[in-house]
Image (cartoon, rainbow, N blue to C red):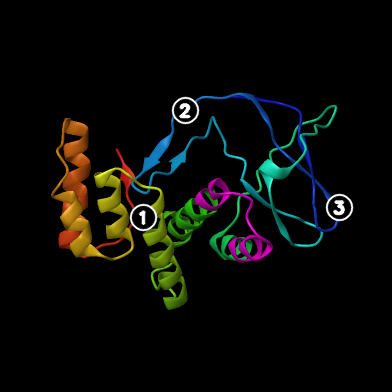
C-alpha cells in the first residue's frame, strides 16, 4: 500500500474543510471476505462513500466532491461511519434527495454492512438487537434483494440475514454448486438456516 497526498473535502452545508486519506496503490493481500458481500482489506483501506463533517455534523457524498489534494503530508482518516451515524446519514441524504439510483444502491449497501458491523463484526458485539434497527435492516435488505442482487446464492444469504428463513431455503435449494468453495458456503448457510441464525459469517 502506498498512500498519496490527503484529499481535501469541503462540507456543502457549512463550508468546513476535512482531510481524508488517498492511495497511490494498494492490494487485497490479507483481505477478509464476509457473507454479506463485504470485503475488509488492510492493504486497500476503504474511504467512506459518505462523510460526516467534523464541524457541523452533517453528512455528504464523496462522489459529489470536487477533487482537491493537499500539497504535502499524510492522512490516515477514512471517515468510516458507525451504524448509528449511517442511519442518520441515510435519513438526511434521502430527505435532501439522491441524484441517481447508484447513490441509493451504495447507501443501502452501506446501511446493511454497518448493521452487521455494529451487531456482529464489532469487537463489542451487541447481543440484543433494537427492534427499530431490526425492522430497518429487514426492509432495507428486501430492497437490496429486489433491486440489486441477482445471484440466487447471495439472495438466499440476504434473506437469511434479515430473518426470512423459508425464503432463504427456497433460494438456497435452487443453487447449483459448481465448486467446492461454493459447496462450503451453501453448507454454512444451510446450518445457520437450520439454527434460525441470522448472523453474518466470515468466508474462509
Q: Where is residue 95 in the image (x, y as percent from the top left)?
A: 65, 66
Q: Give the image quarter of residue 6.
A: top right
Local secondary structure at mark 1: helix
Query: From the viewer's perspective, is the residue at label 3 or at label 2 nearer?
Result: 3
Do callouts 3 and 2 mark residues in contact (Cβ within 8 Å)? no
Residue at coordinates 29% horizontally, 38% vertically from top-left?
204
Quadrant containing the N terminus is top right
For the record, the magenta segment spans 90-105
Residue 93 versus residue 78 in the image, above or below = below
Q: Give the image quarter of residue 66.
A: top right
Chief SS of the magenta region: helix
Q: Name the residue under label 1.
A: 146
Between marks 2 and 1, how big is the CA–CA gap?
A: 30 Å
In this rendering, does residue 77 appear at all?
no
Q: Mark 2 points at which residue?
A: 28
Q: Where is residue 167 in the image (x, y as percent from the top left)?
A: 21, 61
Q: Name the residue under label 3.
A: 15
Specify the farthest residue to the bottom: 131
**Drawn side of residue 150 relative to residue 23, left or right:** left
| Circle 1 residues within 10 Å: few <14, some 14–19, many ≥20 | few
Which comes sooner in the sequence, label 3 or label 2? 3
Residue at coordinates 48% horizontally, 60% vertically from top-left?
118
**Drawn side of residue 191 relative to residue 113, left or right:** left
Residue at coordinates 38% horizontally, 39% vertically from top-left?
33
Amino acid at each position: 500500500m502506498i498512500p498519496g497526498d490527503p484529499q481535501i473535502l469541503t462540507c456543502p452545508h457549512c463550508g468546513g474543510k476535512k482531510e481524508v486519506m488517498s492511495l497511490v496503490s494498494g492490494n487485497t493481500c490479507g483481505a477478509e471476505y464476509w457473507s454479506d458481500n463485504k470485503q475488509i482489506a488492510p492493504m486497500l483501506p476503504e474511504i467512506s462513500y459518505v462523510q460526516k463533517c467534523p464541524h457541523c455534523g452533517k453528512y455528504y457524498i464523496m462522489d459529489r466532491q470536487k477533487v482537491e489534494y493537499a500539497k504535502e503530508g499524510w492522512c490516515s482518516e477514512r471517515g468510516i461511519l458507525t451504524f448509528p451515524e449511517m442511519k442518520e446519514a441515510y435519513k438526511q441524504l434521502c430527505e435532501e434527495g439522491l441524484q441517481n439510483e447508484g447513490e441509493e444502491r451504495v447507501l443501502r449497501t452501506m446501511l446493511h454492512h454497518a448493521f452487521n458491523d455494529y451487531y456482529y463484526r464489532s469487537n463489542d458485539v451487541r447481543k440484543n438487537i433494537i427492534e427499530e434497527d431490526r425492522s430497518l435492516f429487514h426492509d432495507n435488505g428486501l430492497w437490496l434483494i429486489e433491486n440489486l442482487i441477482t445471484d440466487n446464492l447471495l439472495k438466499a444469504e440476504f434473506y437469511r440475514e434479515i430473518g426470512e428463513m423459508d425464503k432463504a431455503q427456497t433460494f438456497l435449494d435452487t443453487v447449483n454448486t459448481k465448486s467446492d468453495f461454493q459447496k462450503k458456503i451453501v453448507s454454512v448457510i444451510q446450518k445457520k438456516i437450520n439454527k434460525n441464525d441470522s448472523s453474518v459469517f466470515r468466508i474462509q
